[in-house]
Amino acid sequence: MVTKQENQVLDALLARRSIPRVHSNRPPRDSIEQIIEAAGHAPNHHHTHPWRFIVLAGTAREELGEVMAESLRVRLQQSGQTATEADLAKERAKPLRAPVVIVVAAVPDTGPKAIEIEEVVATAAAVENMLLAAQSLGLGAMWRTGRPAYDPVVKRFLELPEQAHIVSFLYVGYPDLPDLPPRASGALSHTRWRGWTEG
Ligand SMILES: Cc1cc2nc3c(=O)[nH]c(=O)nc-3n(C[C@H](O)[C@H](O)[C@H](O)COP(=O)(O)O)c2cc1C
């Protein structure tokens, strides 16, 4: 029997933490490819491969920032507010928080067997694989979304079809933080056991 002490998979899962602050130097392409390869090993009903990955680096992040700032400007305008230059500058700078931003989107399969929510959750499982893969490579990653993830203008900029769901803006880089302690999940307190008898 594998004991907890020697279970590297469980160790990695229990130690996983999001890394909100990373250095500006870009990890090698090989590492990004390994992270994306890991994503494709997520479970996926009917093997529809609903996930799409768009790797943004360098000026592509600035372009996303411009689109996100415009998205914010329009959103505020629609609610009768005016974005200040400071609001827009903050929004514009967001994708620059990491040297690589991987947009992970689900494009639901249109075949008769596919169920949309399953396509989205399979893509979410792919993102978790990516977080774990990044950590195993000594990289830090953070799953982010925010309102731009749901803006059709952002999808168009990313050349995603209208029916796509942006599941994550995955920020990746070398950690610029001391190691974060594992956190207690509390998942057992959200668990009910039925028909489980001991002995
Ligand atoms: C679908 C999804 C979207 C998220 N979006 C954001 C976000 O936009 N900004 C943010 O600070 N955290 C966001 N988070 C939460 C972080 O990724 C992270 O999980 C959380 O801060 C807990 O940290 P931990 O992963 O180290 O436990 C999101 C998580 C998920 C699953």
Image: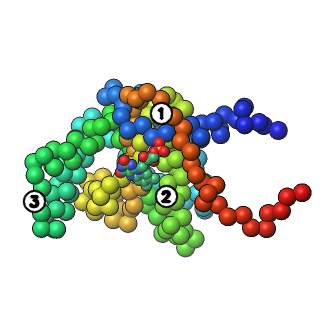
Q: Position of residue 122 (x, y in %)?
A: 54, 57
> In the shown orientation, is residue 132 left or right of residue 99?
right
The residue that disc 2 covers is 50
**Element carrying mark 1:** loop
Q: Amino acid at mark 1?
A: Leu
Q: Residues within 10 Å of mark 3 (few under 14, many from 20)?
A: some
Q: Earlier in the sequence, mark 1 or mark 3?
A: 3
Q: Cβ(mark 1) to ligand 1 < 8 Å? A: yes
Percent position of residue 22, x then y:
36, 31
- Image quadrant assignment for residue 8: top right
From the viewer's side, name the closer residue of 98 and 28. 98
User: Could you tell me which secondary element the residue under label 2 belongs to?
Assistant: loop
Q: Is mark 2 within 8 Å of ligand 1?
A: no
Q: Which residue is mark 1?
A: 180
Q: Is residue 32 above or below residue 123?
A: above
Query: Pointer 1: residues within 10 angstroms few (<14), some, or many (20+)?
Result: few
Compare marks 3 and 2 and give the one earlier in the sequence: 2
Sequence order check, earlier mark of 1 and 2:
2
Identify which amino acid the numbered label 2 is placed on: Pro
Q: Amino acid at mark 3?
A: Thr
